[in-house]
Image: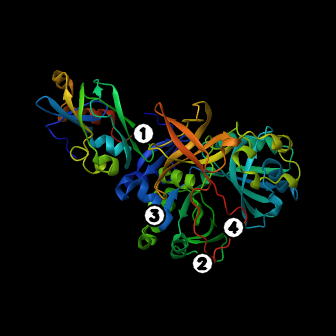
Amino acid sequence: MTYPAALRYTKDHEWIEVKGASGTVGLTDHAQNQLGDVVFVELPKLGTKLEAGKPFGTVESTKAVFEIYAPASGEVLEVNEDLANAPEKINRDPHGAGWLVKLRLSNPAEVARLMDAAGYESFLSGEGTNP
Amino acid sequence: MTTTLRKTPLNQAHRAMGAKMIEFGGWDMPVEYPRTGGLIAEHKAVRGGVGIFDVSHMGDVRVRGGSPGAALAAVQHITMNDVARLAIGQAQYSAMLYPEGTFVDDLIVHRLGGDDFLLVINAGTREKDVAWIRENTKSFDCQVIDLSDGYTQLAIQGPRAAEVLTKLGCSDTAGLRSYHFTYDRIGDLRDVLIARTGYTGEDGFEIYLPSDIATSEDIWRRALEAGGEFGILPCGLGARNTLRLEARLPLYDHEISQDINVWEAGLGRFCGMQKGDFVGRSRLERLKASVTRRLAGMEMIDRGIARDGYPCKNEAGEVIGKVTSGSPSPTLGKNIALAYLPSEFTAPGTVVYVEIRGQKLKAQVVPTPFYRRPRKEKSPGGEGSSSGKR
């Protein structure tokens, strides 16, 4: 899997795609690989205010619980409702149909501090992708 | 990254298949094989077809008598089930206890000969167990031999497991009853110890091979080939855990430990109180009337997954117990858990709450095992057939 150039990435393995003042957030392919088959997703309600770097939901596989951290601050505009019945979308299409929430960014400048695709890939190779 | 993890002879084979590896009890073990479908597919293969597990991390201890009857007496002394009831070629689920009636470990006792036993113990407790066995058999004229590194142990589990064994050369799987073992051909090997045991709640076998890498890889590969037509999958510790949880089989340091006694764990039917003295017996005798908590099965009513260690609460929000194991159940499509609860909360239908990330979510007590395999007339149960091991 190559990491899309249009996205920005966190060390906690979330991505964000910014369009204007809004950002779509998801988990990276690496994260879904580590997690295995996703069976359960817990996401915030519409209107919840997220703070960059703070946990805002959880994704669970049969074996593990994975906390999701906000890549940027903002208010939840939209939640991917499909995931309640089809959490496997996170495994099948982590950078697309498996998106988690859309935010109205309160400080778009935060995104500039995140890694680009090349930066994330080198971060992964440094971290060791297969423990 | 630590390099002190132990590796089974199949470690390279697992990695070559793209297994995701984790540390378990000091061992570097496959947790699932994402390339062939991953945990849920592995779980379903075992319930509906067949799966193969590398369980070479398990420990194996032979206890052999010096003078006649010494090993029998020693194993009677250190395990709770009645070993005298075992015929040669038969096995039983049992446990070793502290004088307090709590668990050193659970195990399977195989009677190899009149005065010759093979004890199969857990990986994470191996050193402790072996030391404990040596210490507590000192006054008996018997040899205690740690054979753990001498065996590659494979578990071939599922309704099609017998057919895989037959294709591998085993001549009489139909004649091998549950919780019995034999010596037969597997691949090019003769006289392989083959036991009809497992830790999945399904029919299945555990085979004990020489532990050299070439032999281990050869049989692993042949078993996968032989099982191809039945949809065999290599299975990791993840599926092993969900399978054993559905069947309510205990895991050390979860459902059983040095802080939990036999009555609390609901394992009294494997405890031979009438057989005579054994380590832990006198305390158990006294404890029997005063059991205040018991292991109970729960399923979540609210949306959420109870995980190991999560607190259980009553209506008022007071902590009444703790989840010992919890997971989504791939077979039932529900979120299930085992927990120690006060006895008055253990009747099926009782509502309890599990605290999950600060939320009090509703669950109810349900009968266990959560899953019971459909019984076939032609495979009669043997000693301890309703339970299994690790």
Disc number placed over residue B180 in the picture, else none? 4
Give the quarter of the figure containing the N terminus of chain B.
Answer: top left
Disc 4, SS: loop
Above or below, B285 against B210 in this view is: above
Point 73% across, 64% down: residue: B383
Where is residue A47, by image quadrant?
Answer: top left
**For the residues carrying marks 3 and 2, which lies nearer the camera in this image?**
3
Residue B71 x, y percent position in the rendering? 82, 55
Contact, mark 1 vs mark 2 (Cβ under 8 Å): no
Left or right: residue B139 versus residue A77 is: right
For label 3, the crowd category at 10 Å Cα-Cα, with few meaning under 14, some 14 to 19 and many 20 or more, is many
Point 80% across, 42% down: residue: B136
Q: Which residue is mark 3?
A: B45
Please tell me which of labels 3 and 2 falls first in the chain: 3
Q: Which residue is mark 2?
A: B171
Amino acid on which disc 4 is placed:
His
Disc 2, SS: loop
Say yes or no: labels 1 and 2 on the same chain: no
Disc number placed over residue A65 in the picture, else none? 1
Specify the subunit that label 1 lies on: A
For label 4, the crowd category at 10 Å Cα-Cα, with few meaning under 14, some 14 to 19 and many 20 or more, is many
Contact, mark 4 vs mark 2 (Cβ under 8 Å): no
Disc number placed over residue A119 in the picture, else none? none
Disc 3, SS: helix
Please tell me which of labels 3 and 4 falls first in the chain: 3
Contact, mark 3 vs mark 2 (Cβ under 8 Å): no
For label 2, the crowd category at 10 Å Cα-Cα, with few meaning under 14, some 14 to 19 and many 20 or more, is some
**Closer to us: B260 or B63:** B260
* C-alpha span from label 4 to label 1: 39 Å
**Closer to us: B307 or B52:** B307
**Closer to us: A72 or A2:** A72
